[in-house]
Amino acid sequence: MVIGVPKEIKNNENRVALTPAGVTELHKYGHMVYVQVNAGEGSGFEDAEYIAAGAIMLPTIEDVYGIAEMIMKVKEPIEAEYDLIKQDQLLFTYFHFASSEELTMAMLAKGAVCLAYETVERPDRSLPLLIPMSEVAGRMAVQEGAKYLEKPLKGRGILLGGVPGVKPANVLILGGGIVGTQAAKMAAGLGAHVTIMDVSLARLRYLSDIMPPNVQTMMSNEYNIREMIKVCDLIIGAVLIPGAKAPHLITREMLKLMRNGTVLVDVAVDQGGCIETCRPTTHEDPTFIIDGVVHYCVANMPGAVPYTSTLALTNATLPYALQLANKGWQKACRDNIDLKMGLNVVDGKIVYKGVADAFNLPLTDVSTMLVEEEVSQ
Ligand SMILES: NC(=O)c1ccc[n+]([C@@H]2O[C@H](COP(=O)([O-])OP(=O)(O)OC[C@H]3O[C@@H](n4cnc5c(N)ncnc54)[C@H](O)[C@@H]3O)[C@@H](O)[C@H]2O)c1
């Protein structure tokens, strides 16, 4: 298959969909990989590394879209890319269609095959191409929290791990899923006193078994949250209710219970946030202060560490990309239910329920399209 990797042109996106290691793998199976010049620059990969791995570098984004049967990207195509997409071209990237009617309409009009990272789903309902970014964000939440606890950045002026003779900071983590678990590991590793809250007793049991002694678990409810926020220095929001807005576990009125300089890192801000006073911020201006409480609410935290994020993402996407390249998208999706779940828009039709529901448009059963293709061969 002919695979194209354009340079990401969305504002502040430094990740790239394929590393030189990924090119080597695809090349090994006989696929042609075309990479746009400088595509890996933001993540620290040079053109020479791609060439050494077997890629052919192309000077412009038009060249890449023009030649490729499968485009591998990180972010959804932006308007400037719409006209470059060809009928039946396979696009393997994050789309988040339900949040953009314009993008959905554009992809329907193009007749492309849109396989969305975020809806690739394992039979156990886990989302293998979202997990790596949650891992990055969870670990980063503690790093950022520790930074903003410093006095010059308006925090309480407390060192997360304390020092001998001085007690460490208290960290509260709301939600013990992927983000929460990674945050807890980092905070505990730095020596903080950590509390993880979740509504799932099974999850709390598991975390209680695997976490070090400076991590305790607590049931998430309003009473416990009110008690804990009085004594915590860093509070990390990491809840997720699939398909729904995050619940406001910390309300505006509860800020007054917190000490001056407490830091809130609401990782769940991309789903509306679990702290009422949070609103999305950017890496350029990541924080704001309300009632003396520092709010960090960057909606795209992994964007700040593109090297790590690119490697984490491509570790997860490459095995799927290989299946798509080796078998073609129809056979790959017939053989692997994870990939089939990733199909959102095919041949001018919406094939993912969440997208059809979001815009009140008809839903086509993709299985019928896959079978039709088999018959016509
Ligand atoms: N800001 C960013 O850059 C960024 C990056 C990655 C992920 N995220 C977001 O982080 C959030 C967490 O993602 P995840 O992968 O850890 O999800 P996850 O599904 O692995 O974990 C969510 C956890 O929240 C728990 N939960 C649900 N309701 C709760 C409540 N009322 N109190 C406490 N816990 C509750 C669930 O039981 C689950 O354990 C999501 O909103 C995700 O979109 C943001």
Image: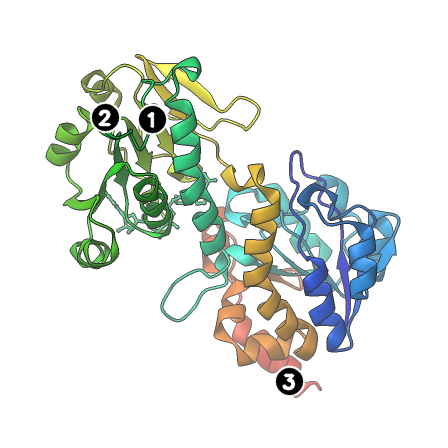
The residue pinned by badge 1 equals: 159
Q: Earlier in the sequence, mark 1 or mark 3?
A: 1
Q: CA distance from mark 3 to mark 2?
A: 68 Å
Disc with the residue nearer the chain's start (3 vs 2):
2
Is 151 rendered above or below residue 341? Answer: above
Quadrant location of the C terminus in the rendered image: bottom right
Q: Does residue 201 sit above or below 236 in this rendering?
A: below
| Relative to 292, residue 344 above or below | below
Q: Residue at x 26, y 20 (%)?
A: 252
Please name which of the two marks, 2 or 1, marks the residue nearer to the observer.
Answer: 2
Would you say 85 lies left or right of 316 here?
right
Residue at the far front: name it.
164
Residue 324 x %, y %: 65, 72
Q: Amino acid at mark 2?
A: Val
Q: Which mark is residue 374?
A: 3
Query: What amino acid does circle 1 point to?
Result: Leu
